[in-house]
Amino acid sequence: MTYLNQFDISLWQACDTFYLKHQAQCLQLQDEHEVNINLLLLSIWLDKQTYRLQDQAWSQLKLEIQQWEERVLLPYRKLRKLSKNSLAETEYQQMLDVELMLERKSQALILHKLRLLPHEGTRSNFEIFLELYQLDSSNYLELAV
């Protein structure tokens, strides 16, 4: 089976469904530990596909996505949050829509990088990913189910 054909928009649709069920915990990890939710969801999805990235691949992926998001997505997210009380509801919704577009750009970048990374790893993607944030995956087992 070739996995590269699976690394398309349908991957994110599956992740969105999972996210809706676990939104509160995902946002808590983002807010308290600066965890990248897209990469968190990817790690869970890849484990379900038994597609294991090597440990170093996760470090590389996190770094490259973090650099892009720190330049574009995160400053915009901060601006949106700061603007919330100063904008009409429709204006704020427009900002949310732009942020979602930036999230989708981030997801496209992740998919592009994913196709280039070495795999045949031996450990759970979820465990490796959380270790990058000094988190113990055993504290988040409900996400790995």
Image (cartoon, rainbow, N blue to C red):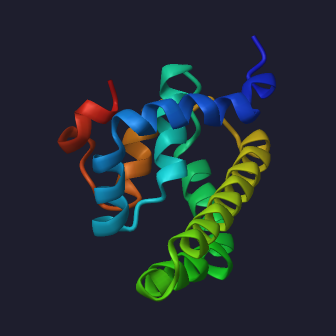
Residue 68 horizontal/vertical position (percent): 69, 72
Direction from residue 32 to residue 64 in the image, left or right: right
Q: Residue at x 49, y 30 (%)?
A: 17
Q: Vertical placement of 121 versus 133: above or below?
A: above
Quarter of the image containing the N terminus? top right
Quarter of the image containing the C terminus? top left
Residue positioned most to the top:
1
Residue 143 horizontal/vertical position (percent): 32, 34
Q: Nearer the viewer, residue 24 or 34?
A: 24
Residue positioned most to the left:
139
Direction from residue 141 to residue 7 in the image, left or right: right
Q: Is residue 123 visible?
A: no
Q: Nearer the viewer, residue 143 or 2?
A: 143
Residue 78 horizontal/vertical position (percent): 50, 82
Quarter where residue 30 is shown: bottom left
Direction from residue 133 to residue 93 in the image, left or right: right
Residue 92 horizontal/vertical position (percent): 55, 73
Q: Residue at x 64, y 61 (%)?
A: 97
